[in-house]
Image: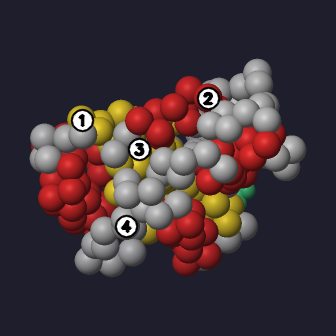
Amino acid sequence: MKVIGISGSLRAKSNTLHYVKTALKVLQEEGIATELISLRGKEIKPCTGCYDCARKQKGRCSIKGDDFDDVFDKMRQAEGIILGSPVYLSSVVPQIMALLARATFVSYWSDKFFSGKVGGPITVARRAGHNVAFSQLLLWFFFNGMIVPGSTYWNVGMAGAGGARDAEKDTEGLQTVINFAHHMAGVMKKLFA
Ligand SMILES: Cc1cc2nc3c(=O)[nH]c(=O)nc-3n(C[C@H](O)[C@H](O)[C@H](O)COP(=O)(O)O)c2cc1C
């Protein structure tokens, strides 16, 4: 059993990274292998809508020369996927959406291999837009037939003003993520152990 946690922030020491790491630490303590993937320093080109994955080469994206395949293969192999995104203008960040659009189409037009995996979203904002971004990620999990455990609140982190990197102060948000990770471990053990 393995869970990968993807942080979509391109900033060093980002808040999103901190929440995703917090979730992965709980899963490790629960005996589940984890891997953190930060999209910082990685290039994920956007989907061009070529439909090659539907027609020409099922199971692969035909866009080359970026880091998509590495991340995608890890998503495909893991039983669990946590997606963390900063909120930019009430939305998930473009690099996360680029990854998810391509991963979804490759899966959808082959054998829908995300189906039955377990996972959930984490979104991080200073003030507003969590619900939109969180819903965007939930729609991804549900489109792909995945199982999303709940928590004691939504997995949303609150950051300080002016680009503050202060996730460690958000005790309520971190606890929500910790509770989510315990629920995720419980569901995964029932399904895969
Ligand atoms: C271009 C940009 C747009 C942002 N838009 C929002 C927003 O719509 N709502 C909000 O509450 N915070 C917004 N923020 C603040 C970030 O969500 C916040 O700084 C968050 O901690 C960034 O995540 P990171 O630390 O993981 O990079 C924005 C920040 C940037 C740079």
Q: Amino acid at mark 3?
A: Gly
For the residues labelled 2 and 3, say whether their Cβ atoms are less than 8 Å apart: no
The disc, 2 or 4, on the residue closer to the chain's N-terminal end is: 2
Taking the image as shown, residue 93 lies to the left or right of residue 29, namely right
Label disc, if present, on residue 69 of the rendered structure = 2
> From the viewer's perspective, is residue 123 above or below residue 82?
below
Q: Quadrant of residue 119?
A: bottom left
Residue placed under numbered mark 3 in the picture:
5
Give how far apart the Cα atoms at labels 1 and 3 are.
11 Å
| CB atoms of marks 2 and 1 within 8 Å | no
The amino acid sitting under disc 1 is: Ala
- Give SS at disc 3: strand
- Residue occupied by mark 4: 148
The Cα atoms of the two marked residues, 4 and 3, are separated by: 14 Å
Between label 1 and label 3, give the one nearer the viewer: 1
**For the residues marked 2 and 4, what is the alpha-carbon distance in whole angstroms?**
24 Å
Q: Residue 106 location, x and y as percent?
A: 65, 44
Q: Are marks 2 and 4 in contact (CB under 8 Å)?
A: no
Q: CA distance from mark 1 to mark 4?
A: 18 Å
Q: Are marks 1 and 3 in contact (CB under 8 Å)?
A: no
Q: Residue at x 75, y 46 (%)?
A: 54
Rendered view: 138 above or below 189? below
- Look at the picture and state if 141 lies above or below 12: below
| x and y, in percent, of residue 184 in the image | 25, 59
Viewer-closest of 59 and 177 = 59
- For badge 2, the amino acid type reads Asp
Helix, strand or loop at mark 2:
helix
Q: Amino acid at mark 4?
A: Val
10 Å crowding of disc 2: few (<14), some (14-19), many (20+): some
Label of residue 33 in the image: 1
Mark 4 Cα within 10 Å, few/some/many (few <14, many 20+)? many
